[in-house]
Image (cartoon, rainbow, N blue to C red):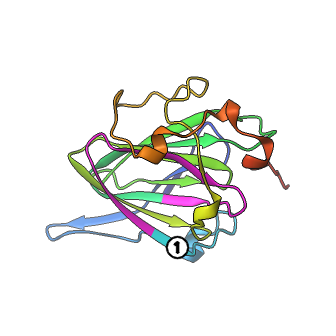
Amino acid sequence: MKIKQLSIEDVLIIEPDVFEDNRGFFMEMYHHQRYSDFLKDCIFVQDNLSFSKKYTLRGLHFQVKHPQAKLIQVISGEVFDVAVDIRQDSPTFGQWVGAHLSDKNRHQFFIPEGFAHGFCVLSQTAHVLYKCTDMYFPEDDKGILWSDPEIDIDWPAKTPILSEKDKQLPRLSDMKPNELPYFCKTQ
């Protein structure tokens, strides 16, 4: 397994070991003991699976009272996946990183707590599986506008398919302090 640190601390690309032969392939998608060495005591409690059509953009979503770290992997298709640092007082507040995830590269994207998450589907359809460290709480569901000009994400689709909810999300600069997580660095 290879681990790549991205430009924002603790956001990772994980390249699991894949064993291929004439029958196909085998890989471990998650192994608690092996992953705990670099995922800093994350315990995943909920798995989600989404199915989306080409140019669907889901995001940018997060929870404050029940923050979720996420381990994302594409089961079929391809997406451009994004993490935005929304931790108040973080040195990288408002910055984003993205990764292409597909059933071909089999990469995983780890996003720690305190980040907004979203993705845009590049293939005709995509199945996206993600593990979360806390349950989904509808009353704690928050988001930021996908096209916030201050964040300036370079999305691959300029006119994506969006939910009505995602079309109405505020810009990051319009969020109140109690609507955003805090940056806590423990060393």
* Residue in front for this viewpoint, 150 or 34: 150
User: How far across and down, in percent of the image, does residue 72 sit?
Assistant: 46, 57
Tell which of 80 and 104 is nearer to you.
80
Magenta stretch bounds? 48-71
Q: Where's residue 92, x and y in %?
A: 71, 35
In the image, is 27 to the left or to the right of 41?
Answer: left
Quarter of the picture holding the C terminus = bottom right
The residue at which mark 1 appears reads as: 46
Q: Is residue 166 magenta?
A: no
Please tell me which residue lies in front, 13 or 183.
183
Seen at 68% across and 42% down, the residue is 86
Q: Quadrant of residue 152?
A: top right
Which residue is situated farthest in the left direction here?
Answer: 22
Residue at 68% over, 44% down? 9
* Residue 65 magenta: yes
Q: Position of residue 81 (x, y in %)?
A: 44, 44
**Amino acid found under the numbered disc labelled 1:** Gln
Q: Residue at x 82, y 51 (%)?
A: 185
| Crowding at mark 1 (Cα within 10 Å: few <14, some 14-19, many 20+) | some
- Residue 36 seen in render: yes
Q: Is residue 143 positioned above or below 15 on the image?
A: above
Q: Is residue 112 left or right of residue 76?
A: right
Q: From the viewer's perspective, tell me whether residue 123 is left or right of residue 156.
A: left
Where disc 1 sits, the SS reads strand
Residue 116 x %, y %: 59, 46
Q: Is residue 119 left or right of residue 142?
A: left
Q: Name the one closer to the observer, 74 or 94.
A: 94
